[in-house]
Amino acid sequence: MTAQPEDLAPIARLLAIMAKLRDPDGGCPWDLEQDFKSVAPYTIEEAYEVADAIERGRYAELKDELGDLLLQVVFHAQMASEAGLFGFDDVCSAINDKMIRRHPHVFGDAATRDSDTQTAEWEAIKASERKSSNKGDGVLDDLPVALPALKRAQKLQKRAARVGFDWPDAERVLEKVDEEIGEVREAIASGNSSHIAEEIGDLMFVCTNLGRKLKVDVEAATRSANAKFERRFRHIEAVLQAQGRRPEDASLDEMEALWVEAKNREKAKAATA
């Protein structure tokens, strides 16, 4: 008698459910229509939802979001298995081998050292792996183009820095920030929209580099800034709503005053925490 999904261990059950969804005989029409490219955007979206649950401290939701992300891995593995490429066990074996290979100080004879040294060794191992693969051995090879722009910028800079193409310190990067702001002003004065966009892009790239030099994850910092803006603007909306008004009914000065009020409240709360 064939085991039913409900009789299986959790991961085996998930694999069985996905196999059934993709079964041409009685499976789900939508799931059967999908391929790697069509599923990829959902995979990215689910990863962001995991990050969002963590950012908001909603750990009860994190369980479900991690499940949704795991489903994406299982979906891709099922399609790969159908195409004769690899299966879920192969995915697990590959990451198991990689983690052991990249942690010789835990699973081998290498001495355990500080975090910075271990990170440098991790990058060296990754570089060695790239050279032995077909991903190319260029410094910037194999960085996914689909990464968020700020995250990819920081990774590009980090890779270049490993071979010495880097500013010596954060102060030099700050000088470059000032220079780029000047170039943005010149571009605005020119009235050329393409030039303005290019210079703003350069400014963002240099600001990202500043974050890297100061050991700040710029992508995470920007998410926090977005969340802060959202909190403070919602305070503006809430106060105006209590007055029977909407933001478009208020002046900029009024909204700015409410923004400062929200900012001060956050500072006071943080001081007493």
Image (spheres, grey):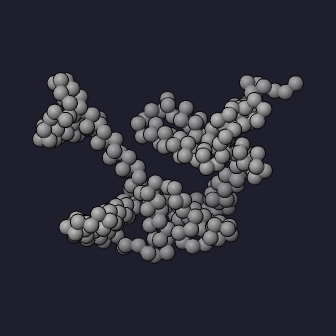
Kindly identify the residue that appears in the image at 58 percent across and 59 percent down. 112
Q: Residue furthest right?
A: 1
Kindly identify the residue that appears in the image at 65 percent across and 54 percent down. 99
Q: Which image quarter holds the N terminus?
A: top right
Report whether 171 appears left or right of 254. Answer: right
Q: Could you say which is closer to the camera, residue 223 or residue 193?
A: 193
Q: Could you say which is closer to the camera, residue 252 or residue 161?
A: 252
Report whether 118 appears left or right of 73. Answer: left
Establish if 228 lies above or below 238.
below
Residue 83 visible from this viewpoint: yes
Residue 14: x percent and y percent? 69, 33
Report whether 33 appears left or right of 160. Answer: right
Residue 207: x percent and y percent? 33, 62
Residue 157: x percent and y percent? 44, 67
Tell me how many marks there are: 0
Kindly identify the residue that appears in the image at 51 percent across and 56 percent down. 146
Q: Which image quarter holds the C terminus?
A: top left
Q: Could you say which is closer to the camera, residue 77 or residue 114?
A: 77
Quarter of the image for residue 213 reads bottom left
Residue 194: x percent and y percent? 32, 65
Kindly identify the residue that appears in the image at 14 percent across and 41 percent down. 252
